[in-house]
């Protein structure tokens, strides 16, 4: 089993903690936590504090690297906070987030087998450690396609003018992470990305905010389509169990633009299902969240380490479920101070959420939110 | 607390990642995952796909080594997949698999205290990372005695002709891993093993398939007996809660033979309990799985890295529970491609399962199964 | 992201496993487990064994260190045994114990943000790896204020005569570890400590037993006060949900004295709440555990590695809940053999517990307990 090499194994701590031996072995060990203290107002014109959200939102351990050859890579991520394990909403603890093996046919064409994020909307695929707000958007919450288990294929085409084209395809269970036996309706997800002006610095197309101060404009446009057949949960890979199976179709178009400290992220969602409402034995209702959503974020680096960002997000449920689900909008302004880029940062958010398109304060259900968050990782 | 030694601590990556200092300290860090995609047919003569099993079946972290002296060893294993934590059948997450401290009186005689596998049938004691099929056998599922917490004693006798004799004894709770307070009926397990032709290469008596191509014949014969007094679960250390306590007695005889790429594994089980059926307050039934079982595996290495294997397993419930539990049989053929021996391998299995001794396809309940599995570990 | 330094990263195994680079990076990795086998008698004058407690009581992983500068420190602890995850009493797995970031304004003044132990009674704040008995006291079980999430501030004053004064303050959720959204009643905890004769060796004021054989007398006196407003659990940060919110006030006075192998630990508790009993919809009762408690421990090192210790603890519920909760007392004698100080040790405890102030054996509810425990950690 021994790797034949005269070199001693090498320890480095620059990028997490890495254990390596030539091109024969690598394991990076990383952790990160997100500690936060936030508040929500009662809503309407009562601006008193209704509830605090003070908790460890995320606590992750990560192992990645290769064994024997750089062609054979692995990625494992575990999460231990209550929310990481999906224990806010369900009773089944799920520490396992990612566990996937990759085989690189070429440096630009690789296959994966295991559990990982589906190539859905850009913000969901961006690590929670690379966000510029404390949470992902309202629209992401409703329409993202999260993680799944299956077969993944990723191919990148590099053109002479440095522009890039990427194609991603996945066949997966459609039931989300850590599903047990699944029915015979699988999920099929495809995504195309085009980067006309070439690659972002430090994979900046999947990291929010232009911390790299791109000297030239960078743009990435993506489009994803997912068909989740015989889905059993309200959001396909996410949400409580439906009372009946439904086919769920999700279309996503998104883009990221960065230039000299400015960054713009835009995401459009559209989810479709025939007959989205299902009924339980006592006429309880669970429905597929069909409709449209938008998330737009604009940010500017104020200094090499500080950033101001603005987000607007809206969820517009489709006509046939509008009596069950209000149109919801949110606006948030965020300030981030990046001590060690995204690894160690302090963030402050202030937001306002309103229902039915009625932003005035006195409307019941409308509320303010504030959040202070510290991210710490290696 | 400092270990007095001039040597610097040493990092190696040949066998997992190991941190060591002379003979004063060792910790090996390992992980492994098993990702799989399988299917079951509807059964009877409907050969359509009823369900897929696509998931991370196992995701384990392991720490082992010694502290201060090689006489004082430890072994810790954590599991994070849904099945690892027993969340397929129960609601209580159990990431802790092994946590045991060993004291070596001599290199061939050691005592253990903690949670670990009982010395039951050979396939159960063999790590799930050293199997030649994706899953253990049908008979193992019914009759194995799994893990438990208690006092362990292991002694090996080496004779002049190189033959080995091993004696293993355990006093344990009888309630399986991570039990809370337990009643005053404990479990007593003993096992004897005889290796007439000497030790297998690389502990091959507890690793399936003859990956070492034993140049001379190797054989191990084992016999285990377990008396689980006042047991509270259907399988003693495993299964749902019985409605009453029962004494459960399990006899196991097994053997492993290897020679020049051929390997034969045989296991015979017999489980006994007086009055095995217990009744709940509303006459619900839970019963001890009494009866007999057999597992036979035959394999041959086709090349230094590839193997063909065949398994037949049968479970014959005892007369008094036969109305509750059908006789069940399975045949499986498996192909394994060992990239880095058992650590990184690709496996394909195809099997057929039939009930009541009636193998013909049109019988309801009979079904085909197929499985593709990738194991990846360090 | 790279740390600019010519030095290679350094591996050490003296104090757990540590990965470091100059004063730029440190991570200590540690684990420890506590395996135990104990028994309880039936109680009254039946001295037969009612139940065994044989299990892995604690299994912890710990990561701590600093990143970039020693001013920015972190501390993470995960627990994986059933009891560690609070699964003995609740259904929600909680592996996350500590996750906190510290900022050191000066070496003697630091701020923390995250989840950690509140500065409550000395024995609770002492790591379970540094106890001289297998479990903390009866009084601790009733009245400790455990862990919480919030903002922590710690300041130490060092006087010319070497005496120390410490002030600790915390604003936290009041709902204990891994709470989700919390109501607008927070918890406020303060603690003052005075060490008139200077610091203990090796932080011995928070480690039980005088393993260091203090050559000169050492004393620490502490007083804590906690106001948990709108508390929702019977013990504030601990226990099942109350049917109504209550304000809970806890006063703690404690002290540790050590000299030449002798150690004395004393703790006094007083818990207050107006109208401590709450009623559920069907008149079920859940009450705040108001009343007083005492824990006294006296120990003497018999040799450099062995120790004899004695504990007496009492819980006296307040008049208004005395019909729901008996006065309870316990006496325990403990022997510890410290192989590698508190890291690797073997402990034996024998104790007697009695109710209503009636210590005679024939009293129903009184019972004996015995415990054998092995702690193993790095």
Image (cartoon, coloured by chain):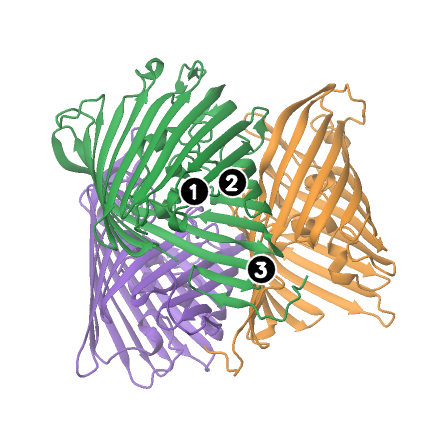
Chain colours: A green, B orange, C purple
The answer to whether residue C221 is above or below residue B334 is below
Residue found at x 51% / y 53%: A64
Total marks in image: 3
Query: Disc 2, disc 3: CB below 8 Å?
Result: no
Q: Nearer the viewer, residue C250 or C176?
A: C176
Which residue is disc 3 drawn over? A25
Task: Report the mark closest to the observer, 2 or 3.
Answer: 2
Q: Residue C99: where, in percent of width, then height?
A: 35, 55
Residue found at x 35% / y 76%: C202
Q: Residue A1: where, in percent of width, then height?
A: 68, 61
Counting residues from the N terminus, which is met first, the one under dot 2 or under dot 3? 3
Q: Residues within 10 Å of mark 1 (few under 14, many from 20)?
A: many
Counting residues from the N terminus, which is met first, the one under dot 2 or under dot 1? 1
Residue B164 in view here: yes
Q: Quadrant of the N terminus of chain C?
A: bottom left
**Residue C294, quarter of the rendered image:** bottom left
Instruction: Describe the element under mark 2 as helix, strand or loop.
Output: strand
Of all residues, the one furthest to the front in this rendering is: A160
Task: Report the mark closest to the observer, 3 or 1.
Answer: 3
Q: Nearer the viewer, residue A98 or C91?
A: A98
Mark 2–mark 3 distance (CA, rounded to whole Å):
28 Å
Which residue is disc 1 drawn over? A85
Q: Please, which chain is the residue tagged with disc 1 on? A: A
Residue found at x 21% / y 81%: C162
The disc at residue A157 is: 2
**Residue B37, quarter of the rendered image:** top right
Mark 2–mark 1 distance (CA, rounded to whole Å):
36 Å
């Amino acid at each position: 089993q021994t790797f034949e090499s005269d070199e001693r194994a090498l320890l480095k701590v620059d990028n997490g903690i890495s254990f390596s031996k030539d091109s024969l072995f690598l394991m990076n060990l990383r952790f990160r936590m997100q500690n936060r203290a936030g508040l929500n107002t009662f809503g309407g014109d009562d601006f008193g504090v209704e509830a605090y959200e003070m908790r460890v939102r995320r606590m992750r351990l990560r192992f990645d690297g290769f064994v024997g050859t750089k062609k054979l890579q692995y990625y494992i991520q575990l999460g231990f906070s209550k929310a990481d394990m999906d224990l806010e909403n369900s009773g089944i603890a799920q520490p396992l987030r990612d566990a996937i093996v990759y085989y690189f046919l070429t440096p630009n064409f690789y296959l994966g087998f295991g559990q990982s994020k589906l190539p859905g909307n850009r913000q969901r695929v961006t690590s929670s450690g690379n966000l510029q707000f404390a949470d992902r958007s309202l629209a992401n919450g409703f329409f993202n396609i999260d993680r799944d288990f299956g077969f993944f294929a990723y191919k990148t085409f590099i053109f002479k003018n440095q522009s890039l084209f990427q194609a991603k395809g996945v066949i997966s269970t459609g039931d989300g992470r850590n599903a047990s036996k699944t029915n015979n309706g699988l999920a099929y997800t495809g995504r195309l990305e085009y980067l006309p002006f070439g690659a972002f610095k430090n994979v900046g197309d999947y990291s929010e905010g232009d911390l790299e101060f791109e000297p030239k404009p960078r743009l990435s446009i993506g489009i994803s389509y997912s068909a989740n057949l015989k889905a059993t949960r309200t959001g396909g890979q996410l949400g409580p169990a439906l009372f009946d199976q439904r086919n769920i179709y999700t279309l996503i178009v998104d883009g990221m633009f960065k230039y000299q400290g400015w960054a713009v992220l835009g995401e459009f969602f559209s989810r479709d299902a025939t007959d989205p409402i299902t009924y339980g034995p006592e006429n309880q209702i669970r429905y597929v969240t069909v409709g449209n959503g938008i998330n737009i974020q604009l940010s500017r680096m104020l200094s090499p380490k500080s950033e101001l960002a603005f987000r607007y997000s809206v969820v517009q449920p489709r006509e046939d479920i509008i009596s069950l689900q209000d149109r919801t909008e949110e606006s948030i302004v965020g300030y981030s101070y990046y001590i060690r880029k995204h690894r160690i940062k302090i963030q402050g958010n202030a937001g306002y959420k309103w229902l039915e398109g009625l932003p005035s304060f006195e409307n019941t259900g409308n509320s303010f939110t504030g959040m202070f968050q510290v991210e710490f990782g290696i």
